[in-house]
Image (tube, grey):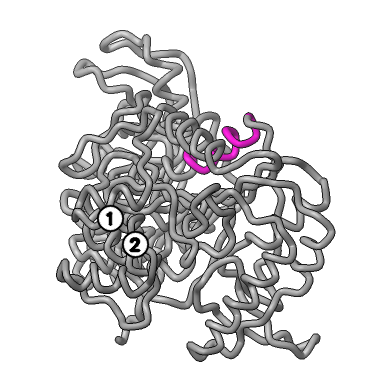
Amino acid sequence: MTEQTNETALSSDPTEVRRQKLALLRETVGDVYPAHFHRTMTNAEFAEKYAGLELDETSDDIITVAGRVYSSRNSGMFMDIHDASGKIQIFSHKDTTPEEARALLPMIDLGDIIGVKGQVRRTKRGELTINAHEITMLTKTLLPMPEKYHGLADIELRYRKRHLDILTNEESKLRFQQRSKIISGLRRFLEGEGFLEVETPMLQTVYGGANADPFKTFHNTLKMDMYLRIAPELFLKRTLVSGLADKVFEVNRNFRNEGVSTRHNPEFTMMECYWAYADYEDMMGLVERMFETLAVGIHGTTDLTFGDKQLSFKGPFKRVPMPDAVKEATGIDFLSMKTDEEARTAAKAAGFAVEKDWTWGECLAFIFEEKVEGTLIQPSHVTHFPKDISPFAKEVPGEPRLVERFETYCNAWEVGNAFSELNDPEEQRKRMVEQLEQAHSRGEKDKQLDDEFLDAIDQGMPPAGGLGIGVDRLIMLLTNAPSIRDVILFPARRNKAD
């Protein structure tokens, strides 16, 4: 076997060398991708069980482990194999390893997946090790591993070949493990608050619940257009009408046929929840408890680092009405103005380029985005949004131009949006008709009135608070990720040829 192996090594193509080794293994070993191999413990369980083994001590235990070969030294005498939980050092020597097993060593390349049965010991240098008695090839890889010290330097390649990114980048691996824990923790938190998880359709005949362009498809059997949901809101509200539960939530995938950026992906994860007999003040408290719980669950503290910033997820968060924030930043007092024209004139006088038909609320929201959003580094609730841009929230008592809505900001990003939900069926229909007319005027001809939702609201929806959280952005904050593509396993990307 050794002679033949040396011959294959003459090839200059590393992939061809591996293919030649694979062919030789098929001849000499047989099945190189066996269906059955059972390990007795994971690498992490191994490290925990034998943590007390003394220096240069050998256990009587014979165990079986498996993993991918990440390093090989002294012609394979020492190998490190990794599974998802950690690494184990494998020692193969003529004094402990039979010739049949050692003969396999020249055929093993970095990246191959092997199984090892052997005796546990701790070396004189303190390394927990397995003296190999048997070595089994479980998967012969045909492609070389990326260079381990630098991993994938090409950012786009990291996103396109996420499997290699995680194989070679412990930071990426940890981040996606944390993502799973965050989403699991989010569910546990909401269940602990008394919310019932439900599932609503991702394929919808009428899209709604947000202002966004949908992805459109066609159902062959039903012979009808359908849309990937842009939000679950209207179905979740129908669930609230049903009386199934007073608190419902969904962790959902949404799809919006819009731009891609460091904070936007065409498909993304949202959490939406609705709480009967609650309002937007209750939802602010819910957000604060949620953020605290998730931060502690991942970091053990509410203090965390994002880039060069120190953030505190300890509630209560700062709360500021939008008109007050704009007045403090610019000196413009929108609440003193009575007309849309006054608002446009004041905005232009302050140097802001506003459109000639913008309303009072649109001017207020635009200046907020321009001058205030970027300053909201610590978690903050911005309240009292203009009714002009918030058609489905209840009015602030005594100020009909504003509504009981807030958005939660952190690191200058919006990560949450909540309302005291509108439940007046006549007002709801009026606002949805107005929204539909505006959409059609913008050329959105596919936009339709959701009559089934309006019928449900006619049946009576209790007063409620509603909340949406951008889960991907929250995970970015909790895992110190600069781009949404760093927290989505397989983000949208251009075709390779583009």
Q: Is residue 154 above or below residue 109?
A: below
Dominant SS in magenta: helix
Left or right: where 340 falls relative to 61: left
Task: Quickly name the residue at label 1.
Answer: 333
Q: Which residue corresponds to the image point at 66% horizontal and 42% vertical from the top-left?
A: 275
Q: Which mark is residue 3?
A: none
Q: Position of residue 240 (x, y in %)?
A: 75, 50
Q: Quadrant of the N terminus?
A: bottom left
Q: Which residue corresponds to the image point at 37% horizontal and 53% vertical from the top-left?
A: 414
> Magenta segment range?
181-192
Q: Which mark is residue 337?
A: 2
Q: Position of residue 76 (x, y in %)?
A: 26, 42
Does residue 104 show up? no
Please tell me whether mark 1 sits on a helix, a strand or a loop.
loop
Does residue 90 show up? yes
Label 1: how many Cα within 10 Å (few below 14, some 14–19, many 20+): some
Real-space Cα distance between discs 2 and 1?
7 Å
Label 2: how many Cα within 10 Å (few below 14, some 14–19, many 20+): few
Q: Which residue corresponds to the image point at 31% horizontal and 26% vertical from the top-left?
A: 95
Q: Position of residue 438 (x, y in %)?
A: 53, 82
Q: Is residue 221 or residue 423 the one in the foreground?
A: 423
